[in-house]
């Protein structure tokens, strides 16, 4: 986040005994919470706030709604209609009455043929709009947090685009794109598209329309900050979710232009083959050692892990977009080759043997001994690191606290006086839920069930403790109230549920389900209802534990296709998916 636009005065939450009795009635979750002690706030720990928010009937003008079909003309309905016309029939003369009865008889026979000859190969459409996705795990806290995430996301839709969260009216390329990839593309595809279409700018030096670079007060903007290519991740995710080819054609051009701008302004082609610029989202004095404070020019000479990972995925996505659009093979290979060279450069120059990847290489070519949670997660998630030994080393050496993975570790030795302003401490080893979401996704991908379980439980505990999805948390779980209800924090939890726990992955050709279900948390069946992907609505039940799929059934029919059978994108309507796992 930009220090310039995201900081007022921090108010630390030091109450550790918040209670959350839950009551579910008539589709509403009622949450009674004890307000945390918050510095200059008028609320005190003996003050009770009662919030009521829609839990099972969250609606939004931007949500895709499946409108029920008109009912088929069943014989029963025809008989009812006939009965209603009886007084009129009795008033007719006998000849007209006989003709009318004959016509009704023909209609009755036709309606019977239509009704009993209807297609029953798919589940019939629901009589009501499908409503929001509902999680049923048998554990109220996890289900409650899921419903809260949906409700808070809706509040972060303003007009036709997303905002970062409470207190912010700005549109952000970074927040929108990470949120889109984690969950928003499936839940609010129109809003994601509209937000990304506004997240562009014209390059003054001739590259054309490029992804908008978020900027900050401490370090400035482009090219000191150079992670604008993150827009490609958001664009590719929403295309995979809905298949809007017109949008893809536009996004492909913007992505190519953005890569060209980065190669021109922020690329070390002579020595390392790495991109320069600030680490993605860590753009404040609190995210860097003291010598970099207010020195955007110096930060712009460093080479950050997360920003290079984003450019790797930018090349990969450009190639995928080009292939989907039928571009020439030469152009597609051009981006694939650049992705391959950048991957090699990252693995060669930023790896700390026996530890993990470095947070960044400084302006003198020296590696920082810190790790940065987002960068490590992207390395694991995007397939940049494929060496099993290195993967195991990363998972073993990053610091998992009680409440999850810090964004940066070890922390820098910052001046205690800096605690007077959020932007002077919030990046320094704090807990950012969207980062935790990516780390949990990476753990699930690599079948690290225990690590995934800890990440999921840790974020759930933070949300239960705080009654909101805050932008970041202190290591003890407290947070400043003005950073409540943050978009990418909500999607971080939803990513853990959808892409981690239920193992849902989607691509241009369809959807696959490969759950990771920790027995330590979920000994019973878990259910995800009303999950929408393109024109299908799924009710998914997962039985058993672990991650090995023993069987997968769709509408009662066992599917073939290995451990992760595909649901083709052409599938329409409501369907029931049953998955049995084995340890």
Image: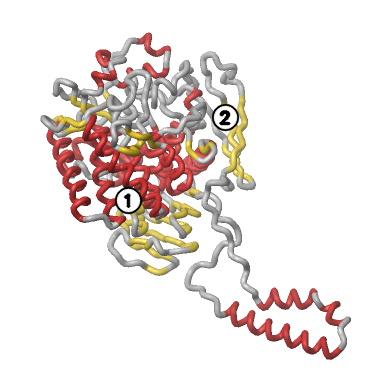
For label 2, count other residues whose C-alpha is less than 10 Å away and answer few (under 14), some (14-19) or many (20+). many
Left or right: 536 with respect to 344? right
In depth, the one of 50 and 305 nearer the eye is: 305
Could you say which is closer to the camera, residue 388 or residue 303? 303
* Res 261 seen here: yes
Toward the left, the furthest residue is: 271
Nearer the observer: mark 2 or 1; the answer is: 2
Give me the residue at 27% from left, 52% from top: 322
Q: Residue at x 15, y 34 (%)?
A: 273
Q: Residue 25 appears in which quarter of the rendering?
A: top right
Return the x and y of residue 291 as percentages of the image width and height: 25, 13
Q: Residue at x 14, y 20 (%)?
A: 364
Helix, strand or loop under label 2: strand
The residue to which callout 2 is attached is 33
Examine the rendered structure and indicate whether residue 177 appears above or below residue 56. above
Depth check: 492 or 30 in front? Answer: 492
Colouring mode (rainbow / by chain / secondary structure / one colour): secondary structure
Q: Say which label, 2 or 1, has the lower sequence index.
A: 2
User: Residue at the location (50% across, 54% down)?
Assistant: 530
Q: Where on the picture, by quarter, is residue 304?
A: top left
Q: Is residue 412 visible?
A: no
Q: Quadrant of residue 358?
A: top left
Instruction: From the viewer's perspective, tell me whether residue 138 is left or right of residue 325.
Output: right
Q: Residues within 10 Å of mark 1 (few under 14, many from 20)?
A: many
In the rendered image, which quarter contains the N terminus? Answer: top left
Drawn side of residue 544 relative to residue 272, left or right = right
| Residue 546 numbered mark, or none | 1
Residue 239: image location, x then y, percent = 38, 51
Q: Nearer the viewer, residue 412 or 6?
A: 6
Q: Secondary structure at mark 1?
A: loop
């Amino acid at each position: 986040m930009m220090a310039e636009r995201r900081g007022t005065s921090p108010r630390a939450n030091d109450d550790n005994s918040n209670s959350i009795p839950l009551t579910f009635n008539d589709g509403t979750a009622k949450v009674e919470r004890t307000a945390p002690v918050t510095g200059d706030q008028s609320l005190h720990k003996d003050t009770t706030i009662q919030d009521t928010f829609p839990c099972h009937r969250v609606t939004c003008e931007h949500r895709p709604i499946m409108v029920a079909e008109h009912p088929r003309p069943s014989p029963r309905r025809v008989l009812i209609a006939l009965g209603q016309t009886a007084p009129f029939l009795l008033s007719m003369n006998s000849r007209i009455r006989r003709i009318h009865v004959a016509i009704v008889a023909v209609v009755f026979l036709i309606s019977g043929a239509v009704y009993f000859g209807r297609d029953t190969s798919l589940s019939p459409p629901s009589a009501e709009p499908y409503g929001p996705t509902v999680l049923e795990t048998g554990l109220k806290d996890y289900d409650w947090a899921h419903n809260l995430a949906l409700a808070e996301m809706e509040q972060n839709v303003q007009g036709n685009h997303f905002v970062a969260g409470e207190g912010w009216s700005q549109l952000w390329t970074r927040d929108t794109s990470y949120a889109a990839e984690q969950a928003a593309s499936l839940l609010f595809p129109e809003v994601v598209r509209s937000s990304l279409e506004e997240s562009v700018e014209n390059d003054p030096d001739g590259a054309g329309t490029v992804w908008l670079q978020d900027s900050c007060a401490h370090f400035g903007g482009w090219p000191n900050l150079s992670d604008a290519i993150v827009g490609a991740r958001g664009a590719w995710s929403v295309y995979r979710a809905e298949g809007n080819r017109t949008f893809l054609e536009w996004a492909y051009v913007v992505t190519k232009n953005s890569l060209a701008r980065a190669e021109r302004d922020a690329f070390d082609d002579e020595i390392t083959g790495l991109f320069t610029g600030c680490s993605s989202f860590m753009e404040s004095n609190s995210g860097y050692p003291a010598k970099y404070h207010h020195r955007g020019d110096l930060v712009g000479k460093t080479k950050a892990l997360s920003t290079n990972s984003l450019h790797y995925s930018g090349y990969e996505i450009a190639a995928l977009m080009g292939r989907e659009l039928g571009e020439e093979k030469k152009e597609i290979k051009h981006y694939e080759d650049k992705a391959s060279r950048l991957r090699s450069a990252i693995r060669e120059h930023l790896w700390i043997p026996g530890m993990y990847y470095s947070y960044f290489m400084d302006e003198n070519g020296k590696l920082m001994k810190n790790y940065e949670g987002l960068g490590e997660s992207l390395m694991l998630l995007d397939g940049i690191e494929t060496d099993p030994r290195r993967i195991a080393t990363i998972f073993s050496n990053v610091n998992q606290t009680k409440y999850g993975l810090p964004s940066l570790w070890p922390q820098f030795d910052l001046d205690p006086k800096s605690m007077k302003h959020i932007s002077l401490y919030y990046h320094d080893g704090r807990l950012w839920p969207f980062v935790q979401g990516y780390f949990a996704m990476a753990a699930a991908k690599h079948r690290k069930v225990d690590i995934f379980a800890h990440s999921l439980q840790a974020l759930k505990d933070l949300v239960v403790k705080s009654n909101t999805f805050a932008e970041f948390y202190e290591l003890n779980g407290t947070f400043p109230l003005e950073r409540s209800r943050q978009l990418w924090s909500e999607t971080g939890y939803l990513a853990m549920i959808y892409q981690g726990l239920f193992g849902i992955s989607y691509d241009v050709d369809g959807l696959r389900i490969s759950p990771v279900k920790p027995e330590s948390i979920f000994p019973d069946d878990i259910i995800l209802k009303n999950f929408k992907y393109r024109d299908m609505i799924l009710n998914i039940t997962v039985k058993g534990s672990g991650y090995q799929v023993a069987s997968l059934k769709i509408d009662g029919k066992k599917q073939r296709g290995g451990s992760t059978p595909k649901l083709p994108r052409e599938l329409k309507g409501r369907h029931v998916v049953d998955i049995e796992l084995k340890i």
